[in-house]
Image: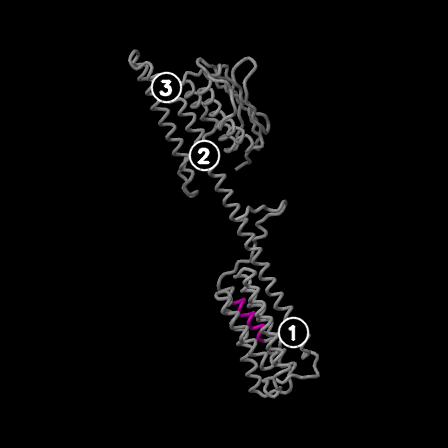
């Protein structure tokens, strides 16, 4: 399927807006439509006819019902209903019924066919309708003897003009087919837009989960790898230090497992209210403590922070987490790091600055920096990261926000 582009400045939800009735309401609408076409067919036929007997009037009513009553079932079986309506219409025309009125029933049945079939296939039904109505009308007006007609036409009336009657029927049938194709195209377009939005939402959710998993796993694994290396190095000479490193690995692993369970728990239904809240700025001391366990001296400098939206707090937490992870992975020990958080009206500023010497030359930015920039961009903010002139690495982020309103 080709990608769908939503029109600029237009809410595609409007395109898919349709009146949605209950089944019984649809049945009532079709019954009223069939009754209206029946009355219209009878009145048009009797208006153009000569004096009729009571038996002929009853026959006219029965023919009109045969043409219009099948329309009640057009939603369940559009193609069979169209075939029955067209056949009944041709019989009615051969017996002298009004062309324009009976063609209206054919147009309504053809509308349902155009909704259910592709335009190329429904065009065959439209051609069959035009040919059938035309053939029956021409036979009744030119070939058949008027004495064999159920309704003898009034030749002095302008309504019996064959060309005008056929022109009216062609227009009615063509309008029914065109309108059906148009509604079908609109519904298909609305369905494509809905599918496109659903796929976009799924992709965004997958990206969010991947980003959360990356932040959680990368930070925790960095600490675990560092402590595992220490435990392995001093296992024989300083077993007490090795045991301490293993304890750090256990605690960090437990915390990482809890974070992963929380992230995966967000995949559950929204009705499960037992999910833990997303981490925020109040959990920063735990990040700082993990970094200190990895032999990074971290100083947390927080000023007075106002009430922030949960999404801004989560982004700020993940940015600081990723920045500290980069310090643990890339800065040679001993390294000092400062985490500074300040707030201005409508903006939150983050700074994570270290003075460590990189273990390897700085190359292209990895997924961590890309993820931090995406989190800042999510709030229309900015993020700058790079080496400092006097050594070390610095990350500066600006996150605009709107203060939450009163509950």
- The span from disc 2 to disc 3 (Cα, nearest Å) is 25 Å
Task: Please provide percent x and percent y for residue 272.
Answer: 40, 41
Q: Which of the two marks, 1 or 2, is nearer to us in this view?
A: 1
**Disc 1 versus disc 3: nearer the observer:** 1
Q: Main secondary structure of the magenta part?
A: helix
- How many discs appear? 3
239 vs 135, nearest the viewer: 135
Percent across and percent down for residue 363 are: 51, 22
Which residue lies under the disc numbered 1? 166
* Residue 336 in sight in this render: yes
Is residue 291 within the magenta segment?
Answer: no
Evaluate if marks 1 and 3 touch, with contact meaning CB atoms under 8 Å apart: no
Q: Which residues are magenta?
A: 27-38
Q: Which secondary structure, mark 2?
A: helix
The residue beneath circle 2 is 210
Circles 1 and 2, Cβ within 8 Å, touching? The answer is: no
Q: Judge left or right: residue 338 versus residue 5.
A: left
Q: Earlier in the sequence, mark 2 or mark 3?
A: 2
**Which residue is nearer to you in this view: 281 or 339?**
339
**Residue designated by label 3:** 227
What residue sits 56% from the left and 56% below the top? Answer: 18
Q: Residues within 10 Å of mark 1 (few under 14, many from 20)?
A: some
Left/right of residue 135 with respect to residue 330 in the rendered view: right
- What residue is shown at x 54% (from left), y 62% (from top)? 121
């Amino acid at each position: 399927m080709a990608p769908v582009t939503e029109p600029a400045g237009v809410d595609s939800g409007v395109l898919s807006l349709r009146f949605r009735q209950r089944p019984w309401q649809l049945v009532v609408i079709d019954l009223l439509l069939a009754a209206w076409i029946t009355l219209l067919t009878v009145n048009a036929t009797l208006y153009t006819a000569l004096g009729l007997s009571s038996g002929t009037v009853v026959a006219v009513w029965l023919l009109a019902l045969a043409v219009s009553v099948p329309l009640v079932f057009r939603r369940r079986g559009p193609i069979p209903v169209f075939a029955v309506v067209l056949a009944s219409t041709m019989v009615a025309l051969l017996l002298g019924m009004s062309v324009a009125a009976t063609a209206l029933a054919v147009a309504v049945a053809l509308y349902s066919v155009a909704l259910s079939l592709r335009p190329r296939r429904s065009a065959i039904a439209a051609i069959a309708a035009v040919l059938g109505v035309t053939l029956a009308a021409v036979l009744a007006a030119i070939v058949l003897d008027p004495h064999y007609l159920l309704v003898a036409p009034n030749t002095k009336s302008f309504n019996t003009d064959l060309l005008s009657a056929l022109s009216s029927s062609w227009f009615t049938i063509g309008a029914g087919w065109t309108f059906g194709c148009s509604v079908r195209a609109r519904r298909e377009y609305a369905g494509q837009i809905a599918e496109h939005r659903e796929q976009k939402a799924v992709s965004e959710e997958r990206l969010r989960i991947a980003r959360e998993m990356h932040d959680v796993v990368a930070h925790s694994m960095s600490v675990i790898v560092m402590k595992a290396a220490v435990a392995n190095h001093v296992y024989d000479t300083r077993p007490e230090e090795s045991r301490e490193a293993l304890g750090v690995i256990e605690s960090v692993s437990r915390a990482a497992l809890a974070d992963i369970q929380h992230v995966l728990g967000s995949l559950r239904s929204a009705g499960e209210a037992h999910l833990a809240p997303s981490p925020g700025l109040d959990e920063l001391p735990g990040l700082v403590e993990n970094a200190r366990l990895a032999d990074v001296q971290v100083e947390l400098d927080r000023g007075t922070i106002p009430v922030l939206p949960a999404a801004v707090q989560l982004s700020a937490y993940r940015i600081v987490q990723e920045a500290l992870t980069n310090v643990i992975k890339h800065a040679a020990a001993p390294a000092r790091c400062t985490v500074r958080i300040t707030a201005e009206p409508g903006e939150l500023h983050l700074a994570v600055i270290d003075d460590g010497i990189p273990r390897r030359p700085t190359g292209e930015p990895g997924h961590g920096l890309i993820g931090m920039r995406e989190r800042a961009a999510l709030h229309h903010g900015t993020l700058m990261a790079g080496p400092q002139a006097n050594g070390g690495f610095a990350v500066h982020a600006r996150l605009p926000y709107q203060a939450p309103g009163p509950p």
